[in-house]
Image (cartoon, rainbow, N blue to C red):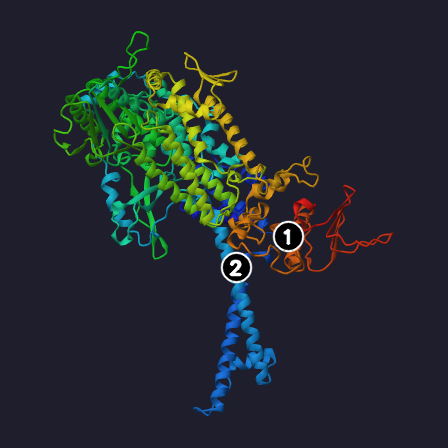
Amino acid sequence: MLRFSRFFRVALDSHDRRPVGRPEGVIPKVLLEIGNAVLLRELNNLPTSNGRRYISTLNAAVYAIAKAIAATADELRRGDVSRDPKRRLKELMDARRSRLSVISALTLELRRRKASRQRKGELRRPSPKFLEVAAAYKIRRRGDLSRVLRKTKDELHVIQLEIRKLEEDQRRKLVRRKGISFVALERFDSPTGVPVEAVRRYWEPIVGTNYPFEVSPELEEWSKTLRSNPSSESSLSLTEEAWKTLFSKVKPWKATGPDGIQGFWWKHLPEARTRLVSWCLMALRRPRRSIPTWLCQGRIVLIPKKKVHLGTLGPGDYRPIACLNTCYKILTGMIAGHISQVVGDRFPGSQVALRKGVWGCTHAQILDQTVVKDAERHKKELHMLWVDMTKAFDSLHHGAIKWTVRQWGVSSDVRRLLSTVMMLQSVRYCGFSDGRQVRSRRLKIRNGLMQGDTLSPLLFCLAIAPVSAWITSHTAPYQTTTGSGPRSDGPLTVSHIFYMDDLKVYTVDWESLNKAREGITLVAGQLGLKLNKSKCAIRSLNTPELGVGPNELDSIPILGRGQEVYKYLGAEQTDLICISEMWDRVAEQAMGVARRLFSSSLAVRQKVNGYNQVVIPKLKYAFSCIVFGTGRFSSLRMRARRFDREIRQLLEETHLRFRHSCAARLYVEKERGGLGMKLVEEELERSIVYTWCYLSSHTDFLVSYELAERLRASSKRSIISDFEAVMAANELQNRVSRSILATIKVDSQTFYAATEAARAISKLIREKWSSRHFNEWKGKEVAGRVLKDCGEIPTGICVKDSFLWSAKGWVSSEVLRNVWGAQEASLLTKSSAAYRALNPGAAPTCRMQCGPYHETAEHVVSACSHWRSNIMVERHDEVARVLYSAIRKKYGVTVTVNTYRPHVVELPEVVIQWNDTIVTSEVLQHNRPDLLVWDKRAERIWIIEISVSWFTRI
């Protein structure tokens, strides 16, 4: 409570705060319950009449209780303050300074005495510091001085080693605490000396200037064709389920806005969440009286776009990353919910982003490649225009946004709230200079959309709808020949595809393409958008003018038959996807991320999770872009296998495995003793399954499916032929089928949605690969011996319990490599096959000369008499101490003990004996167990004995 009160007073004074520190480990639920009770008591009498004061006090209270909970959680986790590594490091630093001072005083005294013997210069008296040291260490003779000097130097050496160890440990813990995203991101030079004021001046004419907006005839024409519901005064309230969905989408530990509160606290403190919802409803009714200025303020973090010397970076070479207050994002999320209710199914059909149930990029790629493949197959004329807007989100006029929202029929109370929020928006640009954070002057946002929440993409898509409508009504679209037959469902007609601000236009003649370019420039310009002509491109197919006409059209490049490619939705294109160029780029980027992950100080489980969650999705997206591929599917499979081999080589270079360790074990589930890594070849197959299911079950792709089926029938590659190859490779040909009604049947179950069908098929593929990897590992004579069941070998072990440590994976790469190497006998011992190949005539006996025993991994780890009295004892004692610590924690034992001596801890509910002699009525030869625990409440006694033994001798 004292902490809360102190933090609460500080939080009320300023809403530009330092972010709440994330506690290590899991926050106990009891702390969250206590914090919620404190909020309820403190905010119980908070008046609701003043909305600005209400949200300001609520925000400060949540910040204060979050700080208090985080500090308490860290204290509970550390436990004994004497074991705090930071305090220990400070003590060692002080001890090092003390030893250095003593060494300096003794060394100077030795020099003084040597000079006095040689009678060089005037005779000086001993220094006061030496007299102090001599009194402390009782130095009376020269021999005492040399002895103390040697001893102090030895102590200094030990202290420096411990300091180095603690510092490395702290660096490792810091990296592991920051996690995967911190390591995976490619970081350029530290952005010191960022010119925040210059960046502010650069962005001021773009987002800080209010530009006039007028309703043009083109916009007026669009508004008349829009099926708009008449605007009402008030909107329908969001349901409880809608609010629940809104909060579930909040990222718990994303970078905070100026108020310093992460989304975790709003999600896990019910009192804060309930009061925030009440305030949002209040702000909808009375926005001007409820929204304070600080709520709509954000901070912009500047990150260099390219790897160059920071002195050569201009203001435009920094990528602005907006960090907004979480309560602001909840408010704008409510606005987005109300707007989505009104728009409903009138959302522009050509805009494939933000549509529920639509896989945006996959949808756009299928439509795009269907058009191009149909034109290639039937030799039809096709002209394509890729359009790129200059700073699209930052250039939309505020007047255009408000006008288009009104045309969609959004109620007046939502529009008033939106207008108030946009009027109060402002940002500061943040960077570092000479190691200190610097901030620019505040810049009010008077143009464009402040990104970072769910509302901005929705407003952008609705605002650019007039551009889409103009293209549809004024250009000649492309119509496929596929699907126009008497037995088909009709051709596919496509004029353009929008994915957010990425636009691609399709026309059947050059005049329509030129008209589309002029119309897009006109209508987009009326909304505030401007074409970036250097990043636009034109491509024509099956036209006699190709290769003869100009290389540019109004400064827009025209791609010919050469090697020019255009990157559309993250995939290189000329006509279809350029697999070679796309794969080379994606594989290089993925390998770079993998190298940063596996070369870092992260724990093994963090590295594997990072690989599965960051590296694999990059490759899966590249695979999902291929609908009508060129070449053979087997060549793509070979690329995936090559990447897997390179990853295994990287694991060897980063000391995560030995070269001759079992490769299949890497891909076995972690619960079964493997590492749980994903195989790129398997993910290739699963990506094809997902694309095929989406193509097969969506009614927009009847023509696309017909085209793919015709290509398969003519022995040409398509997504259907790739899917059939995957089914054949996994022996699933007769278990998956598609009906004429676009439903997918897996075994005896029928699926109507692509996601559920793809998951069912992927599960079957996963089972096949999992069984394959496990059987390959188990089939190894030596490497697979740890998997022998108790029924097969009486001295076997429980696999599940034995691999709990590797399933958790909170160890370094070297530890896992060495343990696996010992288990699989891949260590370079004298009895190993690798050693015998290198030294054919060498004797296989142990190099420690412990007897006529072969030097195997089993012998070195558990049987060699040379190590039995030192390393094996250390291993034995460390394991015992870990168990002892867990037992003490379970029973709440806080008594300080010395684990190097036998002792007994006796409490009212438990008695713990450590390496102590047990007095019995009968004479027992072995009466000193490692641990004895007597639980008086449960009336049970556990005798625990630790053995340094090989698993076959347990």
> Could you tell me the amino acid type at mark 1?
His
Q: Earlier in the sequence, mark 2 or mark 1?
A: 2
Q: Is residue 347 left or right of residue 552?
A: right
User: Residue at (17%, 33%) from the top-left corner?
Assistant: 556
- Of the pair 90 and 104, the residue shown nearer to us: 104
User: Residue at (55%, 66%) from the top-left corner?
Assistant: 158
> Could you tell me the amino acid type at mark 2?
Lys
Quadrant the C terminus occupies? top right
Instruction: Please say if 754 is above or below 776.
Output: above
How packed is label 2: few (under 14 Cα within 10 Å), some, or many (20 or more)?
few
User: Residue at (14%, 33%) from the top-left corner?
Assistant: 551
Question: In x, y percent, where is residue 291?
Answer: 38, 35
Query: Residue tagged by mark 1?
Result: 859
Query: Residue tagged by mark 2?
Result: 165
Instruction: Name the quadrant containing residue 342.
Output: top left
Residue most toward the front?
841
Question: In x, y percent, where is residue 494?
Answer: 27, 19
Mark 2 vs mark 1, foreground winner is 1
Q: Is residue 360 left or right of residue 815?
A: left
